[in-house]
Amino acid sequence: MILRQAQDAIIMTWLYILKCADGSYYTGSAKNLEKRLAEHNTKMFDGYTAKRLPVKLVYYCEMPTIHDAFLRERQIKGWTRKKKEALINGEWEKLIEYSKSRK
């Protein structure tokens, strides 16, 4: 059991944002970011990005667990475009400002 917990702690999970060819953003989470990006760009799954290729990785951050990454993904998907761009650009003051109002 302890060995399994140690192995789980080593697995990195990711939250990521892609910019699609049409200028829209796609937010996702994955255990293997490189593999997931390849899946997006090769239309492995029929979904949002498959109709908006190519996609470009514009933001990613490591998360403690895939569950945490998924929860953050769901949160960001509800954000405005301006707020997502503030996150992508590391504009923390704007991120806080855009969190206060949905203008």
Image (tube, helix red, strand yellow):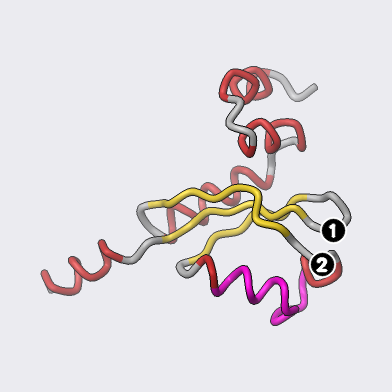
Which of the 4 image quadrants contains residue 20?
A: bottom right
Which of the 4 image quadrants contains residue 8?
A: bottom left
Instruction: Give above or below for 76 relative to 68.
Output: above
**Residue 95 percent location from the top left of the image:** 62, 25
Instruction: Pick out the residue farthest to the left.
Output: 2
**Residue 77 percent location from the top left of the image:** 67, 47
Instruction: Give above or below for 34 relative to 94.
Output: below
Q: Which residue is mark 2?
A: 53
Q: Which residue is mark 1?
A: 21
Looking at the image, which is closer to me, 92 or 54?
A: 54
Looking at the image, which is closer to me, 72 or 20?
A: 20
Is there a contact, CB below 8 Å, between mark 2 and mark 1?
A: yes
Reply yes or no: does residue 40 show up in magenta. Answer: yes
The residue at 13%/73% (across/down) is 3
Secondary structure of the residue carrying numbered label 1: loop
Q: Is residue 97 left or right of 46 when viewed as pictured? A: left
Which of the 4 image quadrants contains residue 16?
A: bottom right
Q: Is residue 41 left or right of 69 when viewed as pictured? A: right
Q: Residues within 10 Å of mark 1 (few under 14, many from 20)?
A: some
Instruction: Pick out the residue farthest to the bottom.
Output: 44
Q: Is residue 82 left or right of 7 when viewed as pictured? A: right
The residue at 75%/24% (across/down) is 102
Secondary structure of the residue carrying numbered label 2: loop
Query: Which residues lie in the magenta part?
Result: 35-48
Q: Amino acid at mark 1?
A: Ala
